[in-house]
Image (cartoon, coloured by chain):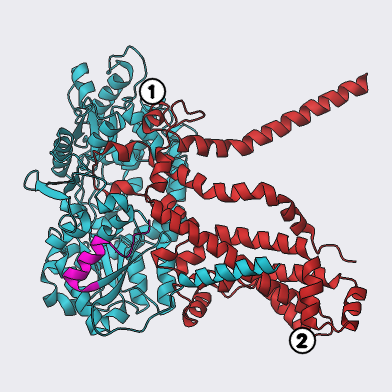
């Protein structure tokens, strides 16, 4: 009986702790969402403390999509960047990983050290900018793609995975006359689909969330990705300065700057949030893939 | 797999459409110039069907490329370090960045050489700013006069009237009014829900109380006293008297209880909710309150601008104004290209404050159909537009950033939106700001100081920590604080300020 009571207390305690932690984690998200739906009058009535919105308004979202063309174009750039960037990153990463997994490759160790080095150090902002400039990539779509094509950590994961492919499979293919390229394309790549999915997903998330490289390399407004546009809206958005000292247009003042910013945060988060649940298992795989040898 | 590859090849082909390479310099046709600014809005603006870009092209023969970066400093330094600088750089009030770039030898070296070609621009530049931006006899940038001083105390006139009180002129009178505002139900709603003061400390410091109250005793930073010695309120006793006053208003409950923790936006909510009697704000408070309360017209007469009450012989003035507004620098590369420099001068001289091009680029007046501008009085102007839908700036708010390149608050333009008639709110704002303009202010010589950021930051940390402890009664040892402040950078700042004042000839 006593044991049962202890178990009950334990379960109640654990449930309580989990619920508390969940509330602590979820509250900021709920607050951001609620604030994005809050009108200026409700903000003032509640003196800025918002737990629930009595009269929700989508005006802040209207504000975000008002210059729909801009957001739409930025969205297309982000989609293109993510798909093209991920595809090319996978190609380069798979080739690098496969090459490093060949134990008889001359200079293999040097190659691995070089890859390891770029995991720890990078060229720095200005040297990288100079390389992008000298290769005429500045202010082009490829400035967001080419510098990120070599994904060192991904290449090492692939190397590890390819090294664990049983030698018998490769030997039998070689006996059938398969070249190294055939081995990679027809043996190694098809059986590494889970790793490709995991690395691809990591790369896609990195591309989707990146804004800094675009900010540094891109000045053409037509090439700015969604995250950069949304970030600028979030950070700058000093319309009261821009529009002058006063504005009588009530529609411009239906929501506070804070609500406008929260709407931007929601718009930037939702696409990747929608993809996440479907691909979460690959993330988990990605974490331990290659960590176990043999 | 093959299908996947096919799709990817298709996507790659589409992405080539978005790719564009660097182009060779063109020696005929419009001059391509890149203008860089830390934006107000930062949203992309179309390159085609852009009336502001077209206006600049027609008027100045410049194909303008606007680069607006929210990480302005970093991007600018990368651009210069990579020998790929923009042509025209709007540095705002970042004078230290200007000096840093000048020291690195990447800016146009001396604007004095162009003075005769920029008569209107040079006429607008205040002498004190010219002195400030002259290094070894060379003028490194172009600045506009400081923005008009429109921040001051605003007191709830309606509350004063209902209580039958006069505007306070001394610290004692201010305390009496504050007690009445807090405890005598000035709004007549039968509830004890009003406060005299508020602030927005954001949990970091005492917020704008310093502007509201410390100036009753004297300036809030380094200054030169009557004996030509350098002084600071922590050393002359003014700061302690100010803290004692704040301690009184906090202990008596005369200030909004969230004053130390709330953000600026949160404190605005309380102000617009008719709960606060005294605020530190520009005249725009009239329209902000009206807009926040549904444009009923009921709040127009709430406020009146109030001169700083006097608590000491040298006190009772408002914060000093700055020495300049909007600093413009040009890259050395541009100065070495005659064609680009000619275009730059055409632009600078053609967009001076009040010019036709200024109004077109800043407010859209004349650049496209709709926006108009009329005089309210000799100083203030009123700009409006009949429809928001046809207004380029309203459809592409990022276009306001073109205006930032040349803007000055000294244009005294009040933007009325789609309300084409000059409204009562606009007139109230003009009244509040005009009154504020007439208030006495401390000398603006301290605005020329450019002090070591590390010492400034360290000394401020010590100050912020002490102030709240003192106000809450956790410490009373002002002398120990003074010593700690001096040791943590205050003494070094004092010496640095003295040296700079001497350099500018303010003290011997």
Q: Residues within 10 Å of mark 2 (few under 14, many from 20)?
A: few
Give the image location of residue A32, x and y in percent: 51, 39
Which residue shows up at 86% across the image and 69% down it?
A164
Give the image location of residue B507, x and y in percent: 22, 62
Name the image quarter holding residue A169: bottom right
Q: Is residue B321 left or right of residue B183?
A: left
Chain shown in red: A
Q: Which residue is mark 2?
A: A107
The segment highlighted magenta reads B43-62
Q: Separation of disc 2 and disc 1 at Cα?
A: 78 Å
**Extreme residue in the top direction:** B190
Locate the N terminus of chain B and report the quarter of the image it occupies. Answer: bottom right
Which residue shows up at 28% across the image and 78% down it?
B108
Is the residue B196 above or below the residue B343 in the image? above
Regarding residue B478, the answer to whether it shows in the image is no
Chain shown in cyan: B
Which residue shows up at 10% across the image and 47% down it?
B374
């Amino acid at each position: 009986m006593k044991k049962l009571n202890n178990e009950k207390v334990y379960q109640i305690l654990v449930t309580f702790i989990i619920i508390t932690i969940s509330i602590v984690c979820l509250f900021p998200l709920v607050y951001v969402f609620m604030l994005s739906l809050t009108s200026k009058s409700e903000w003032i009535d509640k003196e800025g403390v918002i737990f629930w919105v009595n009269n929700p308004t989508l005006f802040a979202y209207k504000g975000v999509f008002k210059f729909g063309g801009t957001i739409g174009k930025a969205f297309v750039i982000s989609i293109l960047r993510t798909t093209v960037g991920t595809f090319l990153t996978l190609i380069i990463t798979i080739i690098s990983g496969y090459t490093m997994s060949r134990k008889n490759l001359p200079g293999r160790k040097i190659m691995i050290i070089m890859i390891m080095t770029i995991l720890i150090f990078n060229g720095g902002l200005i040297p990288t900018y100079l390389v992008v400039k000298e290769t005429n990539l500045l202010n082009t779509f490829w400035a967001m793609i080419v510098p990120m094509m070599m994904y060192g950590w991904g290449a090492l994961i692939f190397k590890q995975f390819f090294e664990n492919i049983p030698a018998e499979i490769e030997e039998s293919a070689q006996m059938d006359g398969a070249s190294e390229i055939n081995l990679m394309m027809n043996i190694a790549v098809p059986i590494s689909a889970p790793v490709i999915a995991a690395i691809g997903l990591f790369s896609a998330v990195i591309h989707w969330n990146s804004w800094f490289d675009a900010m540094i390399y891109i000045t053409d407004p037509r090439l700015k990705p969604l995250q950069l546009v949304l970030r600028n809206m979030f950070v700058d958005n000093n319309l009261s300065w821009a529009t002058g000292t006063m504005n009588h247009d009530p529609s411009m003042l239906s929501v506070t700057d804070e609500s406008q910013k929260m709407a931007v945060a929601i718009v930037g988060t939702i696409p990747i949030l929608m993809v996440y649940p479907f691909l979460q298992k690959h993330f988990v795989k990605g974490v331990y893939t290659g960590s176990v040898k043999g | 797999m093959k299908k996947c590859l096919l799709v990817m090849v298709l996507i790659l082909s589409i992405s080539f459409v978005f790719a564009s390479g660097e182009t060779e310099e063109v020696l005929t046709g419009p001059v391509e110039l890149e203008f860089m600014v830390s934006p107000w809005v930062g949203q992309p603006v179309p390159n085609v069907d852009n009336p502001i870009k077209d206006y600049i092209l027609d008027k100045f023969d410049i194909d303008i490329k606007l680069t607006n970066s929210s990480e302005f400093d970093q991007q600018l330094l990368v651009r210069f370090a990579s020998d790929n600088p923009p042509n025209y750089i709007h540095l705002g009030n970042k004078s230290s960045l200007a000096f840093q770039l000048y020291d690195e030898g990447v800016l146009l070296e001396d604007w004095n050489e162009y003075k005769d070609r920029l008569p209107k621009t040079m006429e607008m530049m205040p002498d004190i700013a010219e002195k400030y931006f002259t290094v070894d006899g060379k003028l490194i940038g172009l600045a506009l006069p400081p923005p008009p001083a429109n921040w001051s105390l605003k007191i709830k006139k309606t509350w004063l009237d209902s209580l039958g009180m006069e505007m306070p002129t001394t610290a004692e009178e201010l305390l009496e009014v504050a007690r009445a505002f807090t405890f005598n139900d000035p709004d007549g709603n039968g509830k004890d829900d009003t406060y005299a003061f508020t602030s927005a400390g954001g949990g970091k410091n005492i917020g704008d109380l310093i502007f509201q109250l410390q100036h009753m005793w004297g300036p809030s930073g380094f200054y030169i006293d009557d004996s030509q010695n350098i002084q600071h309120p922590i050393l002359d006793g003014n700061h302690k008297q100010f803290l004692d006053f704040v301690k009184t208003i906090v202990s008596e409950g005369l200030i909004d209880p969230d004053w130390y923790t709330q953000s600026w936006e949160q404190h605005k909510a309380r102000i617009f909710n008719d709960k606060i009697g005294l605020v530190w704000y520009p005249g725009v408070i009239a329209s902000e309150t009206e807009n926040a309360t549904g444009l009923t017209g009921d709040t127009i007469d709430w406020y009146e601008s109030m001169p700083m009450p006097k608590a000491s012989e040298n006190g009772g003035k408002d914060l000093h104004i700055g020495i300049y507004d909007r600093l413009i620098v040009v890259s050395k590369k541009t100065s070495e290209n005659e064609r680009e420099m000619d275009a730059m001068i055409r632009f600078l001289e053609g967009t001076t404050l009040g010019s036709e091009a200024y109004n077109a680029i800043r407010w859209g007046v004349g650049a496209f159909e709709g926006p108009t501008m009329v005089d309210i009085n000799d100083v203030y102007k009123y700009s409006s537009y009949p429809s928001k839908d046809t207004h380029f700036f309203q459809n592409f708010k990022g276009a306001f950033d073109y205006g930032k390149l040349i803007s000055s608050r000294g244009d005294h333009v009040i933007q009325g939106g789609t309300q084409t008639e000059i409204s009562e709110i606009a007139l109230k704002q003009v009244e509040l700001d005009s009154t504020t303009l007439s208030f006495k202010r401390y000398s603006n010589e301290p605005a020329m100081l450019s002090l070591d950021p590390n010492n400034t930051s360290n000394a401020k940390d010590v100050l912020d920590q002490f102030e709240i402890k003192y106000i809450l009664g956790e410490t009373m040892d002002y002398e120990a604080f003074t010593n700690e402040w001096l040791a943590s950078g205050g003494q070094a700042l004092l010496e640095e300020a003295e040296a700079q004042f001497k350099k500018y000839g303010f003290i011997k």
